[in-house]
Image (tube, rainbow, N blue to C red):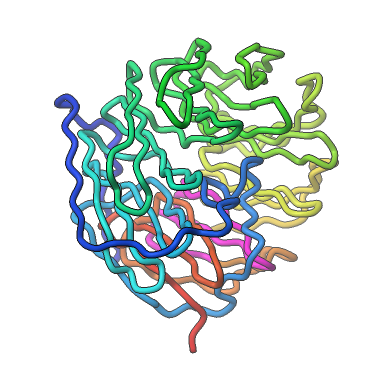
Amino acid sequence: MIQYRFVKLLIPVFGLFLLVTMSSGCSEKADNESSAMFRADSQRSGDFLTQGPKQKPETLWRYHADEGAASSPVTSGNLVFSGRFDGLMLALNNKTGQEQWQFATQGGIFSTPAVAEEQVIFGSDDKHIYALNKFSGSFLWAFETQDRVFASPLIAKGTVFIGSLDHHFYAIDRHSGELKWRIKTNGQVDSSAAIKDDRLYFGSDDGALYAVTTDGEVLWTLDTGAAIDASPVISEEDNMLYVGNDAGVLFAVDLESGKPIWTFETGSRLFASPALKNQQIIFAATDGRVFSLNKESGEPFWQFDAQAVVFSSPAIAGEQVYFGSMDGYLYALDINNGEQTWRFDSGWAIFASPFVDNGILYISSDDGDLLGLVDPS
């Protein structure tokens, strides 16, 4: 029977206390860091440009932590990184699941880490943004905000761009951890930014979508009428952006003007971030429905109903769409028609989003398990 553990949205902060525990060393540096972040790339497309399990998968390895995760796993080189509810950032071997190191913060980690060169960077409920050495887990720097940090960092131009629940959006020097600039919104910022050229795009709980230059100048805002938790996804070829809000409306927005081109109403909160591939914009509502729309017109291609609450953002790998649900199942859908290809019972609720790399699908569940899943041999 499926078991639930409620996601902890409030974790007490007891002050800054750092602990790094080493269990073994890491060997080699990754050649390609381009997808080592939330939603696969800096446009937040959710398209991993690789293949994942096409059949109901088998478990390559299973790592059990004391607490579950809302933070999505991320891989870089031979490592997979995962933040946990108890404030630990873990690094595991991506082929065996063996723990390489762990680093303790003083608040739960909902922020999905991002990797740049030898740094892994993430936010914590203890109000800090951290940079660690990805190979050893050693502390590099921490930047303190005035509230918890749920958003996931975007790393570009030597800068970490990230929002905080203190209503601010920050630009922090990646190497020194020093503040470059910040802008204030009228709500908590847990939406993770996307970038095109020198422009950043993110949402706020004040209901606005923001377009900001990498120097901190606000270009435009769009009032969507309800809080934005989801991260926007950018379609570079047609200069468009797509984002959902808590009122259940998906917006297609012109990047230059900030004007909506079309909207699609679902009637259910859009917490999860959309994914984009070719002509399809794919997203999940919290009532369990997954939609595929024509990105140019907003007309539906297909719809799937998981019949369970969904917070997990869909991940695309080849012809498969993966997402988790709070009934404990990980789903795979055919991207062409939305039909279920398979589902995998994790046994516990899945809040986090899947990550796919070189045929391995990584997912965290709410009981503390982090799994590496592959096609059956």
Question: Can you give x and y, in whole percent of width and height, for residue 136 in the image?
Answer: 30, 52
Closer to the camera in the image, 281 or 181: 181
Q: Residue at x 76, y 52 (%)?
A: 280
Question: Can you give x and y, in whole percent of width and height, for residue 3 in the image?
Answer: 26, 60
Where 320 falls versus 325 (above or below)? below
Q: Residue at x 71, y 13 (%)?
A: 219
Q: How many marks?
A: 0
Where 198 falls versus 34 (above or below)? above
Whether residue 325 appears in magenta in the rendering, the answer is yes
Where 163 falls versus 357 (above or below)? above
- The stretch in magenta equals 307-331
Q: Residue at x 60, y 36 (%)?
A: 267
Where 194 falls versus 55 (above or below)? above
On the image, which quarter does residue 318 sit in?
A: bottom right
Q: Is residue 224 visible?
A: no
Question: Can you give x and y, in whole percent of width and height, for residue 313 in the image?
Answer: 53, 49
Question: Can you give x and y, in whole percent of width and height, for residue 85 in the image?
Answer: 26, 44
Closer to the camera in the image, 219 or 327: 219
**In the image: residue 218, left or right of residue 107:** right
Which quadrant does the N terminus fall into? bottom left
Whether residue 249 appears in magenta in the rendering, the answer is no
Q: Is residue 167 visible?
A: yes
